[in-house]
Image (cartoon, rainbow, N blue to C red):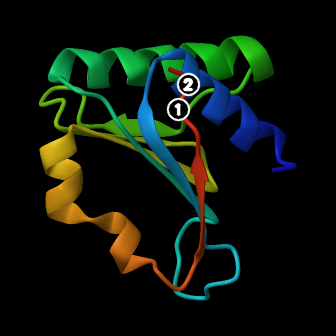
Amino acid sequence: MNDQLLNTIIDGLQNGKAHDIQVIDMSKLEEAAFSYFIICEGSSSTQVYGIANGLTRHVRETLGTHEEGSVGMNNRLWVAVDYGYVLVHIFQPETRQFYNLESLWEDAVITKIPDLD
């Protein structure tokens, strides 16, 4: 991928030990509100929270970019972090399976990012 924000987000997620990272490119879909969804998971509420905090810190320190907003930090089952044209979803595994966002956007190009560990 050739987008600096996307690459920085992916690096931040990998540094936070996020698993099963997938980038959904929706830039060619008219009905999509975002150009990209990045979906990943952490194994517990503590890890989901840590991944989200680490991600925002990594992007801020690397690019000087702040998120436009986030939701879900209190329940930590599903945290969404908004970076304008990129929306990052950090799930616990059961919540990710339940909502199955990847299947909702199966017309988009989905790129799987390898886990580092």
Amino acid of disc 1: Asp
Numbered badge on residue 115: 1
Q: Residue at x 39, y 67 (%)?
A: 102
> Label 1's element?
loop
Q: Is 109 displayed left or right of 75 in the figure?
A: right
Residue with the most extreme right position? 2
User: Which residue is nearer to you in this view: 57 or 109?
Assistant: 109
Where residue 46 appears, x then y in whole percent?
21, 15
- Is 55 situated above or below 26? above
Where residue 19 appears, x then y in whole percent?
41, 34
Amino acid of disc 2: Gln
Q: Is 36 displayed left or right of 38 in the figure?
A: right
Where residue 115 appears, x then y in whole percent?
52, 32
Q: Residue at x 61, y 50 (%)?
A: 84
User: Which residue is nearer to you in this view: 26 or 103?
Assistant: 103
Q: Residue at x 14, y 60 (%)?
A: 98
Where residue 21 appears, x then y in whole percent?
49, 43
Q: Is 80 displayed left or right of 100 in the figure?
A: right
User: Which residue is nearer to you in this view: 116 or 107?
Assistant: 116
Numbered badge on residue 59: none
- Is 3 situated above or below 48? below
CB atoms at circles 1 and 2 under 8 Å apart? Answer: yes
Q: Which residue corresponds to mark 2?
A: 14
Structural crowding at the residue carrying mark 2, measured as other residues with C-alpha within 10 Å and reported as few (<14), some (14–19) or many (≥20): many
Q: Disc 1 or disc 2, which is closer to the eye?
A: 1
